[in-house]
Image (spheres, rainbow, N blue to C red):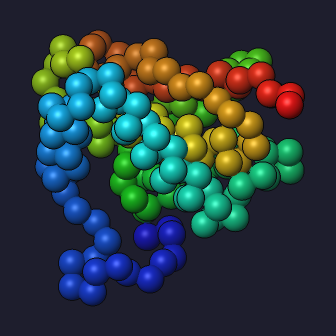
Amino acid sequence: MAIAQNEIRQELGDFSSIVCLKAIVVGVEEALGEKAAAIAMISAGRQRGKKLAEDLDLAGKGSSMSLEDVTVKMQEALGKEGTRLCVIDKVTQEGDIYKVYTHETVCSAGESQGSSRQCTFTMGAIQGFLEAFLGKRLRGTQSESVLRGGNFDLLEYAALPAVNH
């Protein structure tokens, strides 16, 4: 695995199944409602992504490291060699919009075609990672889904204006 850490669990290791994560998501949705659950999952993902960027010593490196180079780091950390959250195909920037093309996201796994499932945790994790890397706040949206005819789970992040106090 690309991320060197001490294992939290001695016998089972640090990974659990998609089935368990999906049960958490569905349970939170049933308890809180879909909108509140989405906010909670995005927030949890953001915390995870921010910590991952910090653990990889990439926080605040947006001005000294190219988007292409950090994309490779994200692919390693979140993909097959890392936590297996998703496959990141590419990351592009169009003005203040960052587009992250993903597939095999943990959020879409096991869902039937036509499902309304959104990639909330995945979107939040990538958002938190990018926010830490770039040093700016972003607003994420999912503009395409493999569950609804898309080739990717396309996650778009718009830079929010800086707040002056």
Q: Does 53 sit left or right of 80 as displayed?
A: right
Q: Residue at x 86, y 28 (%)?
A: 164
In the depicted structure, whether residue 86 falls above or below residue 37: below
In the depicted structure, whether residue 13 falls above or below residue 23: below
* Quadrant the C terminus occupies: top right
Residue 140 lies, in percent from the top left, at 54, 26
Residue sitting nearer the eye, 149 or 165: 165
Q: Residue at x 17, y 35 (%)?
A: 31
* Residue lying at the far bottom of the rendered structure: 10
Number of labels in the image equals: 0
Q: Does 31 sit left or right of 99 as displayed?
A: left
One can see residue 104 in this view:
no
Q: Does 137 sit left or right of 23 as displayed?
A: right
Residue 34 lies, in percent from the top left, at 26, 24
Q: Residue at x 44, y 83 (%)?
A: 6
* Quadrant the N terminus occupies: bottom left
Corner quadrant of residue 143: top left
One can see residue 42 in this view:
yes
Residue 21 lies, in percent from the top left, at 22, 49
Residue sitting nearer the eye, 107 or 51: 51
Q: Residue at x 74, y 37 (%)?
A: 136
